Image (cartoon, rainbow, N blue to C red):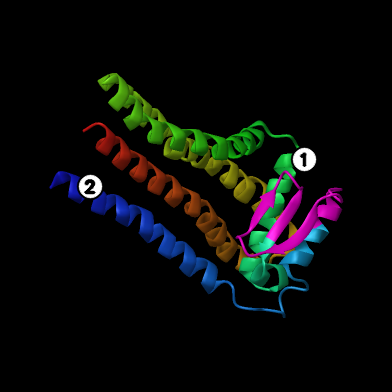
Amino acid sequence: MPYIVLIVLLLLVVFLPQSWVRHVLSKYNQQDENNFPGTGGELARHLLDRFDLNDVQVETTELGDHYDPDTRCIRLTRDKFEGKSLTAITVATHEFGHALQHAANEPLFNLRSRLARLTLWASQLGSLLLFAAPLIMLITRAPSVAVFNIIGAFLIMGFSLVVQIVTLPVEIDASFNKALPILKSGYLEPHQLPGARKILKAAAWTYVAASLAGLLNFWRWLTVLRR
């Protein structure tokens, strides 16, 4: 029973923030052409040119708003790229914040990028270990082989969890040390700043929720493997 209660509580902690994030982004994603002279995509391009990051591109994507350090590209979903809403403007500035982190060669941003590249290899190796462990145990009859299960689970889920934990301060920095000062410097009216702060908090909470979900899944697998 205590395990069930813990799981329910953790699920609430994970899914309630996700619902709040969707609500905030949707609330401020209403078009407001009278207040914004350009779209989110146009603002991203303007900021890149203003800060001499002319080699960074801006594109639309169906995979969610993000900055790709490998191709040096800010990618925005079509509603942000073409939209003139507070959400579009704020999210575009947030992703530009990641381009600034990359250009400044910030250590935590670089660490997160390296870990993200290793995640695929770690997942493949972890899957191989989970598949091979039962076969090795059958052949050798050595119970210590079960350690391969734990290592495999860590490589698949624990490695992703580490990436998410490292990602959180990177996202907070992009939001509140990079994007918000830029937005306050004349891109938003004073009455629009509270909404922008909520959007930036929502962006950070997406990674908090993802980290909690990863922690829950990792804990569940460790519980199963230790039996």
Looking at the picture, does residue 118 appear above or below residue 200? above
Q: Do tag 2 and tag 1 residues touch (Cβ < 8 Å)?
A: no
Residue 187 in the figure: left or right of residue 121: right
Looking at the picture, does residue 48 appear above or below residue 116? below
Most foreground residue, 56 or 42: 56
Q: Is residue 62 magenta?
A: yes
Q: Which residues are magenta?
A: 47-75
Front position among marks 2 and 1: 2
Query: Residue at label 2?
Result: 6
Q: Quadrant of residue 120?
A: top right
Query: Residue at label 1?
Result: 103
Most foreground residue, 118 or 13: 118
The residue tagged with tag 1: helix, strand or loop? helix
Q: Amino acid at mark 2?
A: Leu
The residue tagged with tag 2: helix, strand or loop? helix
Give the residue displayed 58% in from the left and 35% down from the top. 118
Task: Point out residue 14 in the picture as x, y percentages from the top left corner.
Answer: 37, 54
Q: Is residue 69 visible?
A: yes
Q: Earlier in the sequence, mark 2 or mark 1?
A: 2
How many marks are shown on the rendered structure?
2
Q: Amino acid at mark 1?
A: Ala
Give the residue displayed 36% in from the left and 40% down from the top. 218
Task: Point out residue 170 in the picture as x, y percentages from the top left corner.
Answer: 59, 42
Looking at the picture, does residue 131 appear above or below residue 181? above
Most foreground residue, 7 or 220: 220
- Locate the C terminus and report the quarter of the image it occupies: top left
Neighbor class of circle 2 (other Cα within 10 Å; few <14, some 14-19, many 20+) is few
Most foreground residue, 149 or 134: 134
Give the residue displayed 63% in from the left and 69% down from the top. 86
Task: Point out residue 198 in the picture as x, y percentages from the top left corner.
Answer: 53, 61
